[in-house]
Amino acid sequence: MIQKMKARNFLFMVLLAAAAGCAKAPVQLPLVDPAAFGGELDGKKVELFTLKNESGMTVQITNFGGRVVDLWVPDKNGKMEDVVLGYATLDGYLQSNEIYFGTLVGRYGNRIGQARFAIGDSVYVLAANNGANHLHGGVKGFNNVVWDAVQNDEGTLLLSYLSPDGEEGYPGNLQVNVTYELTSDNELKIEYRATTDKATPVNLTHHSYFNLKGAGVGDINDHLLMINAAAFTPVDSGLIPTGEIASVEGTPFDFRQPTAVGARVNEDHQQLKYGLGYDHNWVLTPADSGLTLAARVVEPVSGRTMEVYTNEPGIQFYGGNFLNGQDTGKNGMVYHHRGALCLETQHFPDSPNQQQFPSTLLEPGQEYYSVCIYKFGVEDTAAK
Ligand code: GLA
């Protein structure tokens, strides 16, 4: 009897072990260690928050600039990879040549010409931090401040910041609230809300540097890009829009059909010379209802895809032209020229000085609302 029981127990153990072997072990991602990431800045604690969804997609975000530090998404075989450039420590960000890795951008995303604008009879002079022009909110834009952060659940992070009246030259106390949400559909959804006590321009965006092969792996010349736009806003040599809305037809700016990013980037075109490649705002063709599919990226080898949805009228496609191999990020990866791309949903650059562009003025009593969704998926490109 005892013998029989022993044999049965043994069989049970064997079956249990076999079942455990078959069950998929949860993949342990080499995430950035929150305990080793932060520190203190401007008397505030810098922290790192981890968001996860049911399928294992994971994003880590710091309240320093509201930066996405890493973003893990599967390829067509389920292999996870970190697809954004960044650092494993706050110090890494503070010492970097590129100050916009993964960050929230404000109070005004992209450039304002001659670092000034007028509202009625009042002229406002902003910080000139890009030659004579103002870029991404100034010397200490929203990328360089420590936000207040609350993580209520595994999928959502709330960030808030009160930008004081006069900061970087802007009028009005601006209360900004940003929600990062990781959805069960493998979307990173960013919602921006703001209110002010004086009229002010507002144009908030997000500045992740994506490489769907993996952060630091080669360049993005072979990524296929679709931008849902029939026109773009040409710029002058300082990258300030000339005011023209130009058709993309017959130019290297026509991405209505998916095209390799590098296919035309070195063509002899004045706009590509000014941008040192792609660094322009496209005028989106808005959806009839709901959010507009602004852009779609496919990385043919891994099969990873990224779609960008927004309620904004424009998108800045920046091809990583200023990356130069001088920054070494997470895991010792070197960030080479055109090693990543940014797709920044936005109102058009220099709108405060261009009456014909959609207005960016926020008045007291109004609420600014902007949404950007980066939706990740896979496509079996080999099967096509
Ligand atoms: C933007 C600008 C670029 C560059 C990058 C950051 O997207 O349009 O010219 O400043 O940010 O390096």
Image (cartoon, rainbow, N blue to C red):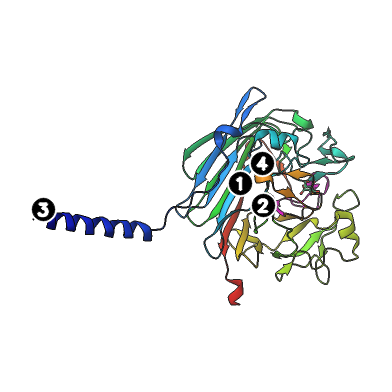
> Where is residue 285 shown, x and y percent of the image?
69, 63
Query: CB of mark 1 within 8 Å of CB of mark 2?
Result: yes
Q: Earlier in the sequence, mark 2 or mark 4?
A: 4
Viewer can see residue 33: yes
CA distance for labels 4 and 1: 8 Å
Element at label 3: helix
CA distance for labels 1 and 2: 9 Å
Image: 91 above or below 60? above
Viewer can see residue 227: no
Residue type, mark 2 in image: Ala
CA distance for labels 3 and 4: 60 Å
- For the point 66% across and 34% down, the residue is 90
Query: CB of mark 2 within 8 Å of CB of mark 3?
Result: no
Which residue reaches farthest top? 43
Range covered by the magenta-colored residues: 341-358
> Where is residue 25 shown, x and y percent of the image?
42, 54
Residue holding disc 3:
2
Mark 4 surroundings: few (<14), some (14-19) or many (≥20) residues within 10 A: many
> Where is residue 80 shown, x and y percent of the image?
55, 56
Q: Is residue 5 shown left or right of residue 262?
A: left
Q: Earlier in the sequence, mark 1 or mark 2?
A: 1
> Where is residue 128 shown, x and y percent of the image?
85, 36
Q: Quadrant of the C terminus?
A: bottom right
Residue type, mark 3 in image: Ile
Q: Which mark is residue 70?
A: 1
Residue holding disc 2:
215
Q: Earlier in the sequence, mark 2 or mark 3?
A: 3
Judging depth in this view, the residue of 369 and 179 nearest the camera is 179
Of discs 1 and 3, which sits in the foreground?
3
Element at label 2: loop
